[in-house]
Image (cartoon, rainbow, N blue to C red):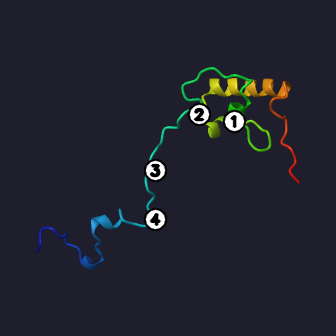
Amino acid sequence: MNPRKPNNPNNDILQPPMAAASSPFRKRQQQVRKKTSPMKKSRIVDYLDHKFLSRFINDQGKILPRRITGLTAFQQREISRAIKYARHLALIPFVAQDTK
């Protein structure tokens, strides 16, 4: 008897131990990337800078949520407040223009 093989009458059914790891159905581990802040190092949000604020508005004119923009909660509040001020000053439109 070979000491490496167990005493199993169905020796032909045994599979190598690496067969389960190389399965095509096994999910790959996803690498977690740290999101870079779209505001970079600037901490001041200026409501007069409409080009900067337009990065946080979608094509319909809605403010994008935090999970999409990658901002912190504090930064998101500042951005949304600045967008609303800019809308009242007519620097940014409330809704998108129809392109027909």
| Discs 3/4, front | 3
Q: Is residue 76 left or right of residue 20?
A: right
Label 1 with label 2: CB-CB less than 8 Å = yes
Q: Which mark is residue 35?
A: none
Mark 3 vs mark 2: which is more N-terminal?
A: 3
Q: What residue is at 85 percent from the left and 25 percent from the top?
A: 88
- Image quarter for residue 26? bottom left
Which quadrant is home to the C terminus?
bottom right
Q: Is residue 4 above or below residue 82?
A: below
Q: CA distance from mark 3 to mark 2?
A: 23 Å
Under mark 1, the amino acid is Phe
Label 1 with label 4: CB-CB less than 8 Å = no
Under mark 2, the amino acid is Pro
Dot 4: what SS? loop
Dot 2: what SS? loop
- Could you say where residue 43 lies in the image, as x and y percent from the top left? 59, 21
Q: CA distance from mark 3 to mark 4?
A: 15 Å
